[in-house]
Image (cartoon, coloured by chain):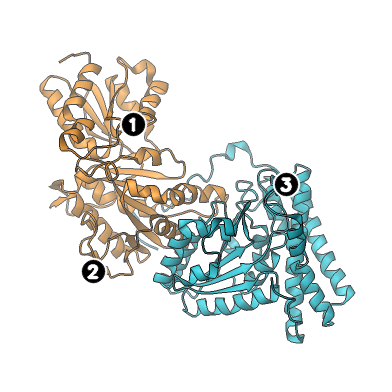
């Protein structure tokens, strides 16, 4: 762990307040998710991102609308900050047709074509090859787009991680790999699963430009991501950020947390990314009481409206069960038409 | 024109590359080597390394990249050397290609074509010879094709590339050298229906892919004995053309399923069950099956041949179905 983030200067104050707001939106939404889970409104697996918000907030802020995002099963925050409405996210967790995937995916499988949000992948490392392919399509089509791929440090043990980094580097593809290193693959500590725990070093072994970043410092994440995204977009090939962060809550709602000490969690909570940025802004005189109250009230209102939206939702009718196993638009299928 | 199954597939790939800029071929040794089975020979020189893209030995990585590229608007053809190797990409095929459309509530379809070799008969041993297409036929969200003729080798690919969803095309390794005549203007074919390769009235021999030639030989032999066999080539293993299966049984009242896959938990079991469920009262005899011995396929030629469906075993099963001990 490193020290407190530097006091943001005037020019950064607006960005910092925005990132604070973004993190707060994610935090409030997920606190509500946990509550709703306890009330059995949400079922299945629920993995919350609480403690890690600086990563999604900092990285996603650097993207353009036409870029693509691939995420994991701990992706509520990524979906929200990419622009998926909180109501559509919550309705998805309620299993309602108003959800962003009609209730087909649930918490672990949020997708949104409108914001080029490609999930929601619940096979660890399974999203990396997809990100490589999305970037390959962009490169072959000559589009200056970036694909950002989020995954946890647990993914580093999977073959798909190594295959994907190699392919991306070999073909110089426009991907930004973002490893959210929260130190535990479910309950297995990094040091108990990897012979080499320096993840950025592994990426560098594939000739991918890689940095380790304090993932509790939203401004540091943003700055590193901005540089990396700019480099990727301008043809610099794949880049890799290891974002050192920590999950404050249990892995899922079924996790008794036998594998870590409460003192360790408490220690990391002293570096809560929301508190850190808030304090830094306040110390520098860039966040008034009224502004802070306003950010909180905005986030609370958004969550309340999302809950109301989800509560008013309806389940998909059972007769729609088999829809979308295959595409419904078969104008192209089985025809002998030429290319578009 | 005279051609072979291999050349027909190559012509289909070349045609697709010429017709659509979004199409590219990707796989192990498809480029500089000319293709493990020489299917893509010459295409690397003709279309260049971007569109005839050699990959590292990373089945999961490049199949997943194919899925991602399809999501990104391309029309990739991914070649996997053999179905045994495709098991290394099973995560991407089953957990991503087959699920994304449904899981995303209809938002993300995956217009990807995966070609791979299947089957035995070339003394390649237990890690290059199995027929696992029946496993893929188990998975909703995939379309599974087996090309058994030159027309299908030439025509299935382009139609598959027009499909908005993932299509797997299985090419039996013993068919690549199969010679024959193909119309000069041969082109895309339907990929939804089974086809009758030989009409008959006494017994239906239901098969697909690499066993079609043996089944046709068996039908010829049966004909000499006065048994008129109908041969149905399934062509599409998922979604099954159940109507065609039931229709042939309704005509002949007897069925033998010939499948190089193993018998337990197999495609042949599925066909047999569908016939029994829907056409039980049409049947004049139990549904017969000719499959591979339930062993990892051996190297030695005599042992490999003994394990596989043979003309002799098919003829015997057909005789049993029509009540002749022969």
Q: Residues within 10 Å of mark 2 (few under 14, many from 20)?
A: few
Q: Is residue A90 left or right of residue A156?
A: right
Residue plotted at (45% across, 62% down): A162
Q: Is residue A241 left or right of residue A291?
A: left
- Select label 1 or label 2 by which is in front: 2
Circle 2 residue = B46
Circle 3 residue = A313
Q: Residues within 10 Å of mark 3 (few under 14, many from 20)?
A: many
Answer above or below: position of B140 versus A155.
Answer: above
Which residue is nearer to you in this view: B67 or A244?
A244
SS for tag 3?
loop
Q: Report, in whole angstroms, how far the alpha carbon at label 1 lies from the one at label 2.
A: 41 Å
Find residue B282 and name its label. none
- Select label 1 or label 3 by which is in front: 3
Q: Which chain is orange?
A: B
- Select label 3 or label 2 by which is in front: 2
Residue plotted at (44% across, 73% down): A207
- Residue B221 percent location from the top left of the image: 12, 26
Does residue A328 appear anywhere in the picture?
Answer: no
Circle 1 residue = B244
């Amino acid at each position: 762990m490193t020290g407190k983030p530097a006091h943001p200067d005037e020019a950064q104050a607006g960005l910092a307040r925005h990132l604070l707001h973004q993190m707060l939106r994610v935090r409030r939404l997920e606190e509500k998710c946990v509550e709703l889970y306890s009330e059995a409104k949400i079922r299945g697996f629920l993995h919350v991102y609480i403690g890690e918000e600086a990563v999604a907030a900092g990285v996603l802020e650097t993207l353009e609308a036409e870029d693509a995002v691939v995420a994991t099963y701990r992706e509520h925050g990524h979906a929200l900050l990419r622009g998926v409405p909180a109501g559509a996210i919550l309705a998805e967790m309620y299993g309602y047709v108003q959800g962003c995937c009609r209730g087909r995916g649930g918490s672990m499988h949020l997708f949104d074509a409108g914001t080029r949000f490609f999930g929601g992948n619940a096979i660890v490392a399974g999203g990396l090859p997809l990100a490589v392919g999305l970037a390959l399509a962009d490169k072959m089509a000559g589009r200056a787009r970036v694909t950002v791929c989020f995954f946890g440090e647990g993914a580093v043990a999977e073959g798909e991680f190594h295959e994907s980094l190699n392919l991306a580097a070999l073909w110089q593809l426009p991907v930004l790999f973002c490893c959210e290193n929260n130190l535990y693959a479910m309950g297995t500590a990094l040091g108990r699963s990897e012979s080499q725990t320096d993840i950025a070093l592994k990426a560098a072994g594939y000739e991918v430009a890689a940095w380790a970043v304090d993932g509790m410092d939203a401004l540091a994440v943003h700055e590193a991501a901005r540089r990396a995204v700019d480099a990727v977009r301008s043809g610099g090939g794949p880049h890799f950020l290891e974002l050192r962060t920590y999950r404050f809550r249990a892995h899922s709602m079924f996790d008794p947390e036998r594998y870590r000490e409460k003192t360790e969690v408490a220690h990391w909570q002293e570096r809560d990314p929301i508190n850190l940025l808030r304090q830094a802004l306040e110390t520098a005189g860039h966040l008034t009481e009224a502004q802070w109250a306003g950010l909180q009230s905005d986030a609370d209102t958004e969550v309340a409206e999302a809950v109301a939206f989800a509560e008013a939702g309806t389940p998909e009718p059972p007769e729609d069960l088999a829809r979308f196993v295959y595409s419904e638009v078969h104008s192209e299928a089985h025809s002998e038409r030429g290319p578009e | 024109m005279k051609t072979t199954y291999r050349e027909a597939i190559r012509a289909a790939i070349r045609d697709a590359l010429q017709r659509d800029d979004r199409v590219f071929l990707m796989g192990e040794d498809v480029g500089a080597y000319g293709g493990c089975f020489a299917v893509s020979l010459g295409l690397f020189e003709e279309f260049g390394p971007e569109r005839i893209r050699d990959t590292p030995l990373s089945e999961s990585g490049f199949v997943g990249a194919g899925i991602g590229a399809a999501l990104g608007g391309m029309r990739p053809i991914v070649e996997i050397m053999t179905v045994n190797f495709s098991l290394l990409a099973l995560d991407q095929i089953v957990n991503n290609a087959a699920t994304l459309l449904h899981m995303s509530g209809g938002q993300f379809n995956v217009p990807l074509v995966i070609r791979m070799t299947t089957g035995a008969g070339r003394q390649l041993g237990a890690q290059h010879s199995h027929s696992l297409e029946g496993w893929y036929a188990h998975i909703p969200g995939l379309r599974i094709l087996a090309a058994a003729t030159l027309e299908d080798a030439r025509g299935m690919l382009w139609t598959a590339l027009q499909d908005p969803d993932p299509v797997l095309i299985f090419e039996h390794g013993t068919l690549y050298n199969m010679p024959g005549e193909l119309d000069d203007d041969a082109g895309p074919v339907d990929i939804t229906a089974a086809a009758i390769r030989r009409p008959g009235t006494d017994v239906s021999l239901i098969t697909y892919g690499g066993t079609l030639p043996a089944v046709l030989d068996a039908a010829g032999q049966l004909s000499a004995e006065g048994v008129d066999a109908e041969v149905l080539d399934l062509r599409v293993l998922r979604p099954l053309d159940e109507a065609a299966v039931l229709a042939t049984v309704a005509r002949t009242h007897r069925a033998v399923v010939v499948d190089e896959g193993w018998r337990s938990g197999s495609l042949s079991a599925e066909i047999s069950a569908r016939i029994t469920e829907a056409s039980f009262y049409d049947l004049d005899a139990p549904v017969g099956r000719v499959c591979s011995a339930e062993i990892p396929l051996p190297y030695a030629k005599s042992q490999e041949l003994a394990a596989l469906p043979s003309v002799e075993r098919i003829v015997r099963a057909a005789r049993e179905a029509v009540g002749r001990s022969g």
